[in-house]
Amino acid sequence: MSEVDRPSFVRRPILPVAIVLLVVVACLGFFAMNGQTGPPSVDAISAAAATTTTLPPATTATTSTTTTTTTTTTTTTTLPRQMSLPVAPPADPKGAEDNPPLGRIEIPKIGLDADLQEGIRLTTLNRGPGHWPGAAMPGEIGNVVIGGHRTSHGAEFRHLDQLVVGDEVIFTTAAGTNTYVVTGTQIVTPDSLWITDPTDTPTATLFACHPLGSTSQRIVVSLALAT
């Protein structure tokens, strides 16, 4: 049998095979044009899946607590006080003393203007009113204590009982002149040494025997520095 006479069913399978080859060639050309040699590999897919997305950091809310500390400052104030203490009464009240006068004492109400002595022995008071050693000085913080006679020698304190609240007593010393005013009068026993106690304010105390011509009691006149 000749090729001319060969049946057509023998030539027909060639056409499908050609079509398949064209499709394969076309696919290869497509991948070549896109820079790929074939479908994505397993490694490429894994790498793509392993891409880490960085999320913005979480915001932490921080509460700041401020503690306020209150500091209390304690200030200690030292109050003024008498800087010296009166000496004890002399064991020999009639012993000799030779101290120069401190200044002068004036009591206008009873007409007194006399030297102010230093000391309380009788021999000193015989010359005039005397300042108790160790007591405050006129004008200072503390108790200025002055003793005097009522009936003997100059009897400068004879009329001490006539003083009333508000009457003036004036002291003049090298430090200056200071005026005190009467705040009260009282009668005490001879052993009432508390009348010489120091004070925290400028005060003064005048004392003498009482009643007139007797030593059984003491008349005490209290004073305060005039403001």
Image (tube, helix red, strand yellow):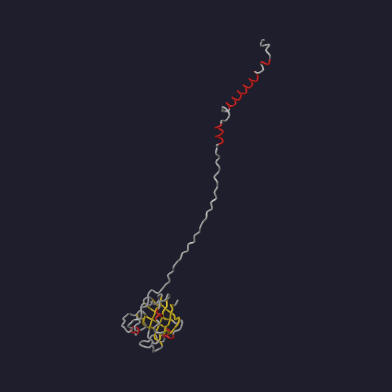
Report the residue that reaches farthest toward the top. 1
Count of labels shown?
Answer: 0
- Residue in front for this viewpoint, 191 or 213: 191
Q: Position of residue 85 (x, y in %)?
A: 37, 76
Where residue 171 appears, as percent x and y from the top left, is 39, 79
- For the N terminus, the quadrant is top right
The image position of residue 212, as x and y in percent, is: 40, 89
Q: Quadrant of residue 174?
A: bottom left
Q: On screen, 76 above or below 53? A: below
**Of residues 167 and 160, the one drawn nearer to the viewer in this rendering:** 160
Quadrant of the image occupied by residue 11: top right
Residue 135 or residue 91, whichever sits in front: 91
Residue 106 appears in which quarter of the rendering? bottom left
Q: Residue furthest front?
A: 1
In the depicted structure, whether residue 60 falls above or below residue 126: above
Q: Quadrant of the C terminus?
A: bottom left
Which residue is rendered at x = 58% and y = 27% of the image?
Answer: 31
